[in-house]
């Protein structure tokens, strides 16, 4: 069955590992054509092939320590242009009509900002015309065009955002994010082979998981899906019979144990301003200065300092910001008269996320229990309504995740649970 | 000295081998910046890095036996987008203002045709604005945009054409084509180490040399330069002190021996229709049918056939067209009642080109002499006002070129001539 102009639209997105070479491109072409044959008007967003974006990043690094955003975006955007043209060829070779569009041709208009522009509007006329003429439409992920006609990019992982934004703009039925895993797992299956695939997850849990370090979906994509109430599905390019993980508004929490997912983030560093005077405005001075330099702060803890009348203020940031943050803190230290700055890069942030947490007392205690059982010391704790994070020694991060997973998903840690996951390649 | 808006414009073009890696890109960046520092408003057309276009061609071949022109062009055009963005970064890193433009941004409008579109118009406003704001402007070679907003390409070697067309549209002072050799040679220095670099050559000789197989400049670029009387120079990226070969309208012919260059083309095949009836319209039938299939024919010779009342009609075509041409000829043979078709792929076409040939009788005789001295048999001869071509056995092609070169450039074949060229790397 071939789709007509009243047929529902499906938007699909294929990541770099799904289109890493000609054979994989042909495999994806079959998935796209199959969707078209089921009667859907089909739009596919394609990422750059394999590691090709990394190669472009390396080229830029070899040429300039600080390339201009405009040229950097123009360079990086070529990766998706290649995969879209290649995919169109593969689909055409199967006897189907396909048309490739770059960000400009697809009408993806963004902010003027480079490297991490937000999509302002998608003028869908060109896509809709092509769909209604029976074409499968292939769109470059990750890129758009700004008011000056310059190419912009949406930041790493931005192809997810492109796909969700297109789903909304086209009023499409569903957005399927295809990747090399079966969906979203209770934790990283490379760390815990017993990890369980989650069938349904709420947007808010998904965003929180992404924020605490789970390699799931781009947080901005999930936020867009939440705002537009868009059906968003993460599934495998290589195991089509598995229908993946569906993101929806609310998930009935009585069906689980209160914890949906467990994540470990090794990219954080802990900074502390030791011996801050106990005056009003000290915390504002520290975090205002960091915000001014665009440095995001995650966990914050204030405790009594060793010296009387002082506090210690500790917090975590992304490791890439250490250099800038230290510079900022040195200035603040001099201004407020603190004792010294402590830096700890050897940390891991282990988090549990779950919308059901609110209704279930004792979840935090269970998490601390699991860590104690594994003899892991907790350096910092922070909680939100649906998340608890603990800072531990970096080399204990994976042990912590395993112990916590066993505590909350004991049924998965039977012989059968392991066998089930080994069958699918973990 | 920085250029002002009234300063003359220079257009430069850098081929793929000149920008094959980050170090070479930086070297070219210095050449461009140096031109800017001399007070010229500077536009540089950049080809795809090294063999990257071949990689894209291979990718397309792996995906489709017959990719659509639109997608093929979109794919191939990415190579130049990468090198332009990279070059802009390299120049910016040197502290200069540079802006990269793809075909669409530079206003290069072409025919709707794909793979070998002709440039219809260059809307130079964006380029001129950037130049007048003090920017060095970098433009993707080889590509433009058609009336539908689709990306088009100008065919292999089309970056030369882009550069010459830009020179004309911008009313620029000169177009410098930078490459990995010092200029145009009397013949291929890899075949004849004694080959002499030509300081000046007329457009018409240059076109003829390109047409008979010399790897010099894209013929369409030279034709454009001739029409616009554009100063066109071919020179080396790596030996800047050499000012290369300048193409101009007329070269005083008394300064040479009548022969400007010698070329060998191994890509031809010879076809013959044996035993054609000696009726009017037979040749028209053969060549009309070939033209209808877009097959270009080069040398044509008609001779008396062995069978009384018949002729043999022999001609050369590009080897890639053999399959199609044979199919066409089989149909024509049946229609006109010829005896059979002969195919010979083992040929080389050796040609001498020179505007001075017209005034010098005996040049053809000298060429045949040179071939006889090397014991090389001539299979076909064709002449024009400024060219003589001889078909020889393929494996004798290089010997033929060497013998002819020695005949017309005897002074180069002294000990000193060889030493001179060895010094520059041949």
Image (cartoon, coloured by chain):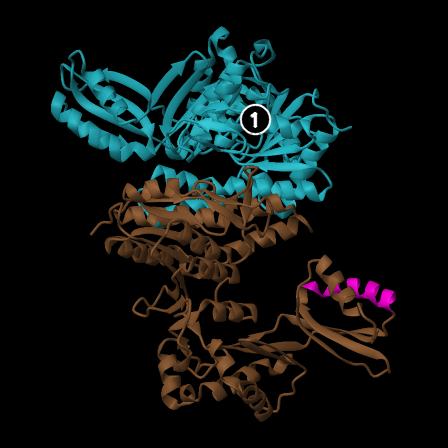
Chain colours: A brown, B cyan
The numbered mark 1 sits on a residue in which chain?
Answer: B
Give A58 or B394, whichever is nearer the viewer: A58
Q: Is residue A323 on the magenta stretch?
A: yes
Would you identify the image quadrant in which residue B411 lies? top right
Q: Is residue B395 on the magenta stretch?
A: no
Density class for disc 1 (Cα within 10 Å; few <14, some 14-19, many ≥20) is many
Residue B217 at least partly seen? no
Q: Position of residue B252 (x, y in %)?
A: 59, 10
Would you identify the image quadrant in which residue A274 lies? bottom right
Mark 1 — residue? B184
**In the figure, B200 relative to B116: above or below?**
above
Horizontal arrangement in the rendering, residue B415 relative to residue A257 (left or right): right
Q: Which residues are magenta?
A: A321-336
Give A283 or B119, whichever is nearer the viewer: A283
Q: Quadrant of the C terminus of chain A?
A: bottom left
Give B413 or A125, whichever is nearer the viewer: A125
Residue in the image at 53% along x and 54% along y: A53
Horizontal arrangement in the rendering, residue A277 relative to residue B394 (left or right): right
Q: Position of residue A271 (x, y in %)?
A: 73, 72
Question: Hey, which residue is sitting farthest top in the picture?
Answer: B359
**In the figure, A148 relative to B107: above or below?**
below
Horizontal arrangement in the rendering, residue A285 relative to residue A244 (left or right): right
Count of marks, rendered view: 1
**In the figure, B65 relative to A226: above or below?**
above
**SS under mark 1:** strand
Residue in the image at 20% along x and 27% along y: B329
Q: Position of residue A360 (x, y in %)?
A: 49, 85
Q: Position of residue A216 (x, y in %)?
A: 48, 67
Residue in the image at 60% along x and 28% along y: B127
From the image, give the main secondary structure of the stretch colored magenta: helix
Residue B315 at least partly seen? yes
């Amino acid at each position: 069955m071939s789709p007509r102009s009243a047929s529902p639209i499906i938007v699909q997105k294929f990541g770099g590992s799904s289109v890493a070479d000609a054979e994989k491109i042909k495999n994806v072409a079959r998935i796209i054509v199959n969707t078209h044959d089921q009667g859907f008007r089909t739009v596919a967003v394609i990422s750059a092939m394999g590691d090709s974006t990394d190669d472009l990043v390396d080229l830029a690094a070899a040429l300039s320590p600080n390339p201009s955003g405009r040229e950097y975006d123009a360079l990086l955007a070529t990766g998706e242009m290649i995969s879209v043209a290649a995919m169109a060829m593969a689909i055409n070779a199967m006897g189907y009509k396909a048309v490739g569009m770059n960000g400009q041709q697809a009408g993806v208009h963004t902010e003027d900002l480079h490297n991490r522009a937000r999509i302002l509007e998608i003028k869908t006329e060109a896509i809709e015309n092509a769909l209604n003429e029976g074409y499968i439409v292939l769109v470059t992920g990750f890129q758009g065009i700004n008011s000056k006609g310059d190419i912009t990019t949406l930041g790493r992982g931005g192809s997810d955002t492109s796909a969700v934004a297109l789903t909304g703009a086209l009023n499409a039925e569903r957005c399927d994010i295809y990747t090399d895993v079966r969906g979203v797992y209770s934790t990283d299956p490379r760390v815990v082979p017993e990890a369980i695939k989650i069938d349904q997850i709420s947007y808010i849990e998904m965003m929180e998981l992404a924020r605490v370090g789970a390699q799931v979906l781009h947080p901005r994509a999930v936020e867009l899906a939440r705002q537009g109430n868009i059906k968003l599905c993460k599934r495998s390019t290589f195991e089509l019979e598995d229908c993946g993980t569906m993101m929806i508004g609310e998930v009935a929490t009585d069906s689980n144990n209160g914890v949906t997912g467990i994540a470990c983030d090794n990219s954080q560093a802990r900074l502390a301003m030791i011996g801050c005077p106990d005056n009003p405005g000290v915390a504002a001075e520290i975090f205002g200065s960091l915000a001014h330099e665009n440095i995001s702060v995650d966990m914050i803890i204030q405790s009594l300092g060793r010296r009387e009348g002082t506090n210690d203020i500790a917090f975590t940031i992304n490791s890439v910001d250490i250099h800038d943050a230290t510079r900022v803190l040195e200035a603040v230290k001099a201004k407020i008269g603190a004792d010294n700055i402590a830096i700890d890069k050897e940390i891991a942030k282990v988090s549990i996320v779950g919308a059901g947490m609110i209704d279930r007392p004792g979840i935090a205690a269970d998490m601390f229990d699991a860590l104690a059982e594994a003899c892991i010391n907790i350096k910092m704790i922070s909680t939100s309504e649906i998340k608890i994070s603990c800072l531990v020694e970096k080399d204990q991060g994976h042990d912590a995740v395993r112990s916590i997973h066993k505590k909350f998903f004991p049924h998965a840690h039977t012989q059968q649970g392991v066998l089930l996951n080994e069958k699918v390649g973990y």
